[in-house]
Amino acid sequence: MIIAEQKPLEEIREMLGDAKKVMVLGCGACVTICFAGGSKEVGILSSQLRIAAKKDGKELEVIEDTIERQCENEFFESVKDKMKEADVVLSIACGVGVQTIAELFPDILVLPGLNTTSFGRPKEPGVFAEYCGGCGDCILDLTGGICPIARCSKSLLNGPCGGSENGMCEVDPKTIQCAWHLIFEKLEKMGRLDQIEKINPPKDWSNSMSGGVRNIVREDLLEVKLES
Amino acid sequence: MKSNSNLEKVFASGQLAVTGELGPPKGTNIKVIEEKAKHLKGMVDAVNLTDNQTAIVRLSSIASAKILLDIGLEPVMQMVCRDRNRLAMQSDLFGAVALGVRNMLCLSGDHQVFGNHPQAKNVYDIDSVQMINMLKTMRDEGKLLSGDEIDGEFKMFIGAAENPFGDPFASRVPRLAKKIAAGVDFIQTQCIYDMERFKKWMEGARARGLHEKCFIMAGVTPLKSAGMANYMNNKVSGISIPEDIIKRMKGVPKEQQAEEGIKIMVEQIDELRKVEGIKGIHLMAIEWEHRVPELVERAGLLPRPKFD
């Protein structure tokens, strides 16, 4: 899933400027699971905006709504009229959701309420960890199912570096586990330590963002669309 | 000879090699390099030039290396994977070789969060093991990573760092083996204080014959004060200073702590050069370049060999 977190309230208020009518639009998918942009967060953020406006003596109407997914066109049907009534739509979906609105509704001003951070998972209550770097060339078969691209602070392919201490990464020893420590232990447990001494060659980054924008075009699916 | 560098010659002659280190200035003031170099001349076989160490912007290691060559000191040019992709690396390596650099040290590099531009985007296109292998291919096959041929000679003595004190400990000998397989000629270790752990690591390396497949240099940094010992122990990842050394530093008055640090260093060097498989000492006298003549003298590392 996509992990995101809410922007600081002050930054959001600054973006909203003098807008009088704001729609806070949540998303029922990933950002609901990471407690950043679901219906509950829509309610909390809307209240905060109202209270802050009142405190400053500013006029502000906040409309609240949440749709199932902001990344797909069809889910906007039920809210599009309400969206058009607002001066601003504050989307608290990931960056994909914000851009879907910008593309589908060119006349609406849409602003991002979240910072989208990574592909990950809720590891334990309150911890949303990064797991995948979206590099376009998966090597989890070589690394005991632990991704060094996303989970090593230097994305090393032949780690661990010298900055690994007691299983933690020097970049933030409180929260970041050393991915290569985990890989080493995992391969050891699996009896595959020979793998650790194989030199992983320079990676082909052309499938990552480095190779340019990645749009997948599936001819087989395009044809289905034409037929129907 | 792979590079014909002075450092390579010292190793080849069977003598204990000694390298120093020089931190370039945070600006264009080359007098800093000239001043530091003055103290190192004739005292060490080659001098490491750090590449934006601790992710702080400094005069580039390649330009510093050229300045050193002009003074008549042999550089070991450090290069980190943090700041350059494979294009920039290979291009700068051409430049370095063309300018006369013959020793390299391949490093991952400190993460930028520790430096003066923590907002920077890092590169890590290739890692240090891959860099070693890239250099070997450039030197031995005359080819770039792409397979394209290099126009001209490419001579280089390829070095890398190893940190026996990083975790997991069991990964540290395999990692040395990996760097050797990638093509490393010499290794400089992280500064050693925990002698017991270092010896255990060397034992593991010897058990696999790795000490005969590359030249291993033991890293040493003299402690200037009890404060420095504490700082390095607590704040610098991958360095652990045993309690007895910290106690020894604290046990003397402040004005005698530098002297105590030197005494400890001399003892460490005496002990390290007896370890089977140690072929050199890498002396990292951090911002203490002017004390190097005294340090190497007292450690019994003089005179340095000369070759025609």
Image (cartoon, rainbow, N blue to C red):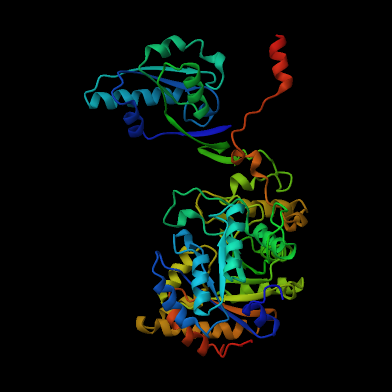
Q: Residue B177's image quarter? A: bottom right
Question: Is A59 located above or below residue B51 in the figure?
Answer: above
As drawn, A92 above or below B295: above
Tally of marks: 0
Query: Residue shown at 42%/11% (left/top)?
Result: A82
Q: Position of residue B256 (x, y in %)?
A: 38, 84
Q: Nearer the viewer, residue B39 or B53?
A: B39
> Taking A68 as reference, is B103 above or below it?
below
Residue B116's spot in the image, x, y percent? 41, 56
Residue B70 left/right relative to B134:
left
Q: Quadrant of residue B192?
A: bottom right
Where is A97 relative to B20, above or below?
A: above
Residue shown at 61% from the left, 88% from the top: B305
Work out which quarter of the rendered image holds the C terminus of chain A and state it: top right
From the top left corner, tell me how far across and down residue B186 is, in percent. Answer: 66, 72
Q: Nearer the viewer, residue B119 or A60?
A: B119
Residue B221 in view here: no
Where is the N terminus of chain A found, in terms of image quarters?
A: top right
Going 30% across and 26% down the picture, which residue do you hit?
A: A17
Residue B259 seen:
yes
How far from the left and from the top, in percent, is residue B223? Answer: 46, 77
- The outermost residue toward the left is A57
| Front one among A85 and B29 | B29
